[in-house]
Amino acid sequence: MESTPLAIYPGKVGRKSAGFHPTLWGDFFATYKPTSLSQQKSDSWIRQRIEELKEEVRGKLVSATDLVEKLRLIDAIQHLGIAYHFEKEIDEALSHAYDAKFESSELDAVSLRFRLRRQQGYRVPADEFSKFKDGNGSFKATLADDPRGLLSLYNAAYLGIHGEDILEEAILFTKNHLKSMQKSLEHPLAPQVSRFLETLLFRRMKRLEARRYISEYEAEDACNNSVLELAKLDFNLVQSIHCEELKIITLWWKESDLLKLGYARDRIVELYFWIVGVRFEPHYSRSRLMTTKVLGLLSILDDTYDVYATLEECRQLTDAIQRWDTEAVEQLPEYLKYYFLKFVNTFKEFEDELAPEEKYRVSYLIEELKKLAKCYLQEVEWYAIDFVPTFEEHLNVSLVTSCHRMLACASFVGMGDVATKEVFEWVAIFPDIVKASSMISRFSNDVVSAELEHKRGHFVISMDSYMKEYNTTEEVATKKLQTLVEDSWKTTNQAFLKPTAIPMPILQRPANYSRMTEVVYKYVDSYTNSTYLKDIISLLFLQRIPA
């Protein structure tokens, strides 16, 4: 690898530098052996017990006759991360809830029914909350005496789509009251209010939220012992599966020898954590491993264009990716030859792993990579001449370099039969929900990274383009980007409303990437500065739940 600084761009001498901190995990997960699922019981007994509990809980779901009681059971099952065992029963129950007559005047129950049905794609009218307004058109002051109802309405209101003013009013009303009463609440409501005021329930990483909610559910008056036991045992079992996958992916990363590219971020554990947030369920193992490998290669690609390669090297790499031929390696500098071949060979390994009728999927992934490389190069060329594009020009490029478009495609490559050719054609046109996910990621990242990016003198970010085009301040630009993030969440909510041409498991992928943005880019870029993720990763992969 070349080690002497080179003139990169006119007037800009030397390679850029990022000074990324080294990996926090090293080979830890390559040799880590999880403890037994239980100190008292064998793993086989635990698995058998889980099957028994699934039948018990399934029976409770089917036999519950009181609608509100059934809705609260569904909410607990979803919140605890075990809903993937009961998808058919939950869908049938919420379909019935959509058709059934419902005349409750209880704020918690009405809000819960609205949220659960909206999450499931039902077009529930928001004006059912009008009953909670007074003669002046404001939400009734007496609602302030119902903290659980307020929290339920708060979480429901964020399932709104464009043009639902009553839900915007509900957000302001509930947020103000919940903040004012926050310090006077008791467990288990107090930590939930605190957590959801930071990031509301629907936007939280499902696996992380389940881990935190289990101890709170135990203290709930409506706690069901079978549901609680299942949640604990299932969490520990799935955690063991994740640790086995982490071992596989850590060894792959180490054996790939890509770390000799010393300028790139070494974050394979954090990348796997990211993909667990997109789909944690055991049956998506192949998809998780494939997507994490893609993400690892993309992270290096991002750092190559962003912090190391010269303009000419960027052009050579982009051309090689467009050709997608091993012979193209000859045009690359030495330090990029092995990396490019690793990219090509990894995609070839995906083809070998896929069934004959699935192999076509990789061709779509390659096309997304070609689009991504062209956009990376465009950012470098703008940087080379100190050009600040218009906001729209910037978005046409930076929404692609957010990588969410390619990652959506990568997520589908390892999925089962639900990922049809129509799905790959759909993602190739950059549909609204994928574009919304890209916006959420791009703007959230730019807001928290602005100060650092300006100090490092790296690429123009979306905020810079907005400030120049509209001759405004960074504060005004930040507020605009935050408004666009909220609009993108409404677009996401809209995409789930039935009828949908695309199956729910597919739509969940870009939505879950958006949820991971709330974890990774909430306050800082915690992928780059991954010390912020260390405790969360330990909580999800290393800490058993006593069961």
Image (spheres, grey):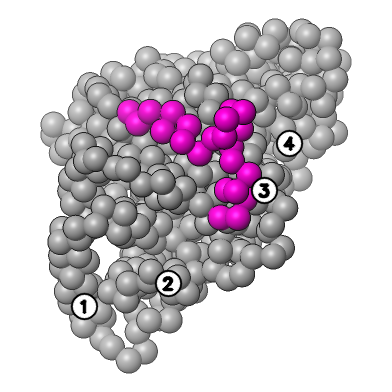
Q: Amino acid at mark 1?
A: Arg
Q: Amino acid at mark 3?
A: His
Residue sitting at x 48%, y 32%: 130
Q: Earlier in the sequence, mark 1 or mark 4?
A: 1
Q: Earlier in the sequence, mark 2 or mark 1?
A: 1
Q: CA distance from mark 1 to mark 3?
A: 43 Å
Q: Amino acid at mark 4?
A: Ser
- Label 3 crowd bin: few (<14), some (14–19), many (20+), radius 10 Å: some
Magenta stretch encompasses residue 479 = no
| Residue picked out by circle 4 | 449
Q: CA distance from mark 4 to mark 2?
A: 43 Å
| Residue picked out by circle 3 | 177
Q: State if disc 3 and disc 4 touch (CB < 8 Å).
A: no
| Residue picked out by circle 2 | 221
- Label 2 crowd bin: few (<14), some (14–19), many (20+), radius 10 Å: few
Q: Which mark is residue 49?
A: 1
Residue 123 against residue 119 in the figure, above or below: above
